[in-house]
Image: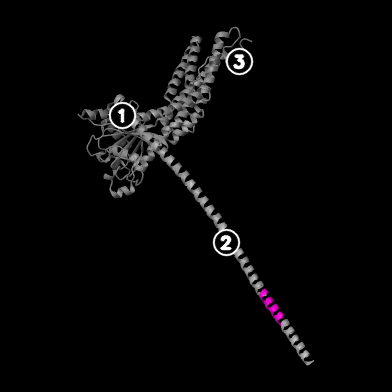
């Protein structure tokens, strides 16, 4: 029993040991399994991280690839653009080289042709330029001819358009614009319309007076109308050539003895050394002309040779030309040396006047000097002078009218002292003669002289925007003079030979028509049948 108990106990212990061993194995196995599970989980986590890292790296590399691809494509596009631009630059360079080659060839050819033209015909490049300008002007002329042919403009308006194109001053522009707008055209058309009616009435009186009972009062009305037109045309012609002067420029001649300052005055007026100034008498031999815009009015100032007797044939020709230019000039500036006049102005100046002198206490003295000085210059014959009651000589027998002259005393700075210069400016008008004292060196008195000269120029041209339109062309004056002569012929023949009188009217109509470019006889018949109902 005891042993059995021991054995049972031993077997129980063994069983217990087995059980314990099994439990230990199971625990160990479980630990191993847990370890492997843990290790496997860790491995799985690590694999997941690697996968995630791998995926991120792939995505990064993919983006890098895209960026690299984009960069490569951009560079390729830039390269293509650069190549395109370079090709365009090369093409432009080629064109430039071709153009330079063409220009060189044209220059060479033009020089060659210019040389040949100069050798064969004596033509220079300047003449070629003048020809091109002439062609351009002829194109403008052609457009004017087309407008005239289509009745858009008459001849006076076409001339106004041409004058507007070539106008150099404001006054010229205003006159040309007024003429282009039809001021002269309307005036001449009015005279032409009245003369047409007169001519139609006379023709009707000649041809139908007996059949149609046309009364003689018609002829009397024609006489009154023609006298009215004659009066208007004469007034239009007596305009002192102001329109022509404004269109062509006012001609001013500077005349006087040698070395009185004529060339210095010209240089002073045009503000440039246009003429040679020298103390040697007779330096200026020929006429030196300068065109100026004088207060909006065109002037052509001429410096002339000193007027004196000389044995030099060349200087004699210069003197002859100077006298001719002086006689034809619109304004004569007669320059005298104040140091050689015996102080005439100072001797006759009113001592009570310390500023501008407007008159002399002895005006006859200045008049005598003016006439004698013209005689010394060979411009006036003192034996034929006639001193009027006003104290001024009658110069109507010569081309020198006192209204067109300015007596200018130069070198006033050598006569008056500094004290006198500060208080006295000598200028004025005596018996219609305007006189001034200036110094071409110090320019003393120049402002007043310029004002006097500008006033004379303006008075000769007048304001082109006021009053009746002025004649602007010499052909207008010629045709109007012929028209006037024909109208006077009508008045002479109206009571003796009506047929000749009617012929004179037709001549007058033709001259009026030649001014505007409208010449027709059909209008006369239209008026005859309209006014007298002939043929009904």
For the point 36% across and 43% down, the residue is 447
Does residue 468 show up? Answer: no
* Left or right of 269 on screen, residue 532: right
Q: Which residue lies most toward the right here?
A: 1
Where is residue 178 drawn, in percent x and y? 49, 31
Q: Which residues are magenta?
A: 20-33
**Residue that numbered label 3 is attached to:** 530
Residue that mark 2 sits on? 57
Q: Residue at (54%, 13%) from the top-left corner?
A: 202
Q: Nearer the viewer, residue 296 or 106?
A: 106
Mark toward the start of the polypeptide (1 vs 3): 1
Q: CA distance from mark 1 to mark 3?
A: 68 Å
Q: Which residue is mark 1?
A: 115
Per the image, label 3 sits on a secondary structure element best described as helix
Mark 2, secondary structure of its residue: helix
- Contact between marks 1 and 3 (CB within 8 A): the answer is no
- Image x and y of residue 33, in percent: 67, 74
Badge 3 or badge 2: first in the primary sequence: 2
Is residue 45 rendered magenta in the image?
A: no
Discs 3/2, front: 2
- Residue 388's x, y, as percent? 34, 30
Residue 66 place in picture, x, y as percent? 56, 54
420 vs 168, nearest the viewer = 168
Quarter residue 104 falls in: top left
**What is the quadrant of residue 54 in the picture?**
bottom right
| Quadrant housing the C terminus | top right
Label 1, residues with CA under 10 Å away: few <14, some 14-19, many ≥20: some
* Closest to the observer, 67 or 228: 67
Quadrant of the image for the N terminus? bottom right
Q: Which secondary structure lies at badge 1? A: helix
Colour convention of the picture: one colour
């Amino acid at each position: 029993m005891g042993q059995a108990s021991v054995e049972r106990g031993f077997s129980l212990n063994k069983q217990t040991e087995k059980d314990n061993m099994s439990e230990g194995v199971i625990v160990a196995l479980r630990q191993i399994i847990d370890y492997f599970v843990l290790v496997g989980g860790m491995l799985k986590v690590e694999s997941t991280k690697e996968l995630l890292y791998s995926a991120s790296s792939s995505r990064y590399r993919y983006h890098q690839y895209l960026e690299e691809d984009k960069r490569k494509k951009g560079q390729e596009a830039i390269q293509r653009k650069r190549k395109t631009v370079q090709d365009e630059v090369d093409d432009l360079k080629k064109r430039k080289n071709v153009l330079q080659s063409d220009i060189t060839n044209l220059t060479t050819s033009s020089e060659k042709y210019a040389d040949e033209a100069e050798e064969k015909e004596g033509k220079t490049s300047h003449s070629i330029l003048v020809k091109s300008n002439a062609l351009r002007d002829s194109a403008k002329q052609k457009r004017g001819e087309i407008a005239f042919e289509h009745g858009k403009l008459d001849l006076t308006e076409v001339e106004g358009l041409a004058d507007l194109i070539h106008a150099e001053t404001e006054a010229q522009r205003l006159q040309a614009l007024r003429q282009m707008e039809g001021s002269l055209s309307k005036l001449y058309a009015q005279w032409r319309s009245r003369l047409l009616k007169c001519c139609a009435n006379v023709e009707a009186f000649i041809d139908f007076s007996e059949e149609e009972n046309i009364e003689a009062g018609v002829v009397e009305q024609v006489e009154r109308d023609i006298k009215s037109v004659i009066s208007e045309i004469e007034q239009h012609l007596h305009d002192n050539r102001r329109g022509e002067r404004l269109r062509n420029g006012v001609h001013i001649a500077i005349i006087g003895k040698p070395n009185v300052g004529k060339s210095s005055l010209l240089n002073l007026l045009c503000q440039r050394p246009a003429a040679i100034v020298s103390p040697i008498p007779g330096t200026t031999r020929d006429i030196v002309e300068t065109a100026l815009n004088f207060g909006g009015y065109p002037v052509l100032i001429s410096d002339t040779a000193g007027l004196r007797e000389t044995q030099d044939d060349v200087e004699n020709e210069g003197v002859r030309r100077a006298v001719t230019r002086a006689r034809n000039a619109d304004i004569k500036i007669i320059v005298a040396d104040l140091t050689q006049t015996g102080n005439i102005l100072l001797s006759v100046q009113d001592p009570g006047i310390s500023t501008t002198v407007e008159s002399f206490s002895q005006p006859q003295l200045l008049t005598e000097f003016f006439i004698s000085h013209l005689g010394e210059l060979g411009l006036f014959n003192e034996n034929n002078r006639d001193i009027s009651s006003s104290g001024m000589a009658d110069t109507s027998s010569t081309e020198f009218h006192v209204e067109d002259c300015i007596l200018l005393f130069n070198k006033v700075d050598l006569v008056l002292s500094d004290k006198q210069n500060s208080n006295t400016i000598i200028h004025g008008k005596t018996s219609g003669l305007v006189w001034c004292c200036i110094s071409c060196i110090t320019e003393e008195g120049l402002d007043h002289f310029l004002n006097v000269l500008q006033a004379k120029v303006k008075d000769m041209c007048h304001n082109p925007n006021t009053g009746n339109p002025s004649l602007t062309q010499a052909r207008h004056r010629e045709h109007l003079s012929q028209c006037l002569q024909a109208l006077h012929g009508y008045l002479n023949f109206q009571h003796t030979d009506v047929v000749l009188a009617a012929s004179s009217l037709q001549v007058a109509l033709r001259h009026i028509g030649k001014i505007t470019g409208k010449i027709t006889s059909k209008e006369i018949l239209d008026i005859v049948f309209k006014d007298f109902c002939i043929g009904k």
